[in-house]
Image (cartoon, grey):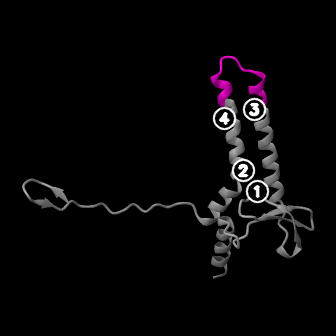
Amino acid sequence: MKFTGRRRLALVAVPDPVPVEGPSLEELAAIEAEEPLILAELDVVDAECRIARRDVVTEWDWRRLRRAQDKVTRVAAQLRRLGACSCPPYRWTDTEVRMSDCRYGCKVWRCRCGAERLLHSAIYGCPTGRAALTAAAAAVA
């Protein structure tokens, strides 16, 4: 409502809300899985910006850039290794290889072919695990 003068109110038309389409649960899970790589690439951009801003580039600046580039390579290789296997689930061992970097206590499992896979668990509240569980339930239904 809008005040139009002495004690008169006029109704103002309110526009319909615009529907906002966001990423699906699977897309959010993929983004979260790639988060370490995204952060490593941001470190490279940060190091490159430091070099570009300086008049005199020191050896420390070049080291920072090399370390950031090495980190991108390591993280990309790790992500590739974790998602490399397409074996059926019965081929996976029932023992964990190690804990993952996920703050919810998710684990890395090893396949008989030697590939490792990060499996997020919805039990401890991992949002990626919940998204995968919801997607699996939707696929069955």
Q: Residue at x 12, y 54 (%)?
A: 4
Circle 2/circle 1 CB separation < 8 Å: yes
Residue 113 in the figure: left or right of residue 99: right
Q: Quadrant of residue 60?
A: top right
Disc 1: which residue: 101
**Numbered label attached to residue 36:** 2
**Numbered label attached to residue 65:** 3
Instruction: Give yes or no for residue 46 being in the magenta stretch.
Output: no
User: Which quadrant is home to the C terminus?
Assistant: bottom right
Q: Quadrant of residue 80?
A: bottom right
Q: Residue type at mark 3?
A: Leu
Q: CA distance from mark 4 to mark 3?
A: 9 Å
Residue 36 in the figure: left or right of residue 23: right
Q: Which range of residues does the magenta coloring cover? A: 49-65
Q: Residue type at mark 2?
A: Pro
Chain-order first, disc 4 or disc 1: 4
Q: CA distance from mark 4 to mark 1?
A: 23 Å
Q: Residues within 10 Å of mark 3 (few under 14, many from 20)?
A: many
Q: Residues within 10 Å of mark 2 (few under 14, many from 20)?
A: some
**Numbered label attached to residue 120:** none
Q: CA distance from mark 3 to mark 2?
A: 17 Å
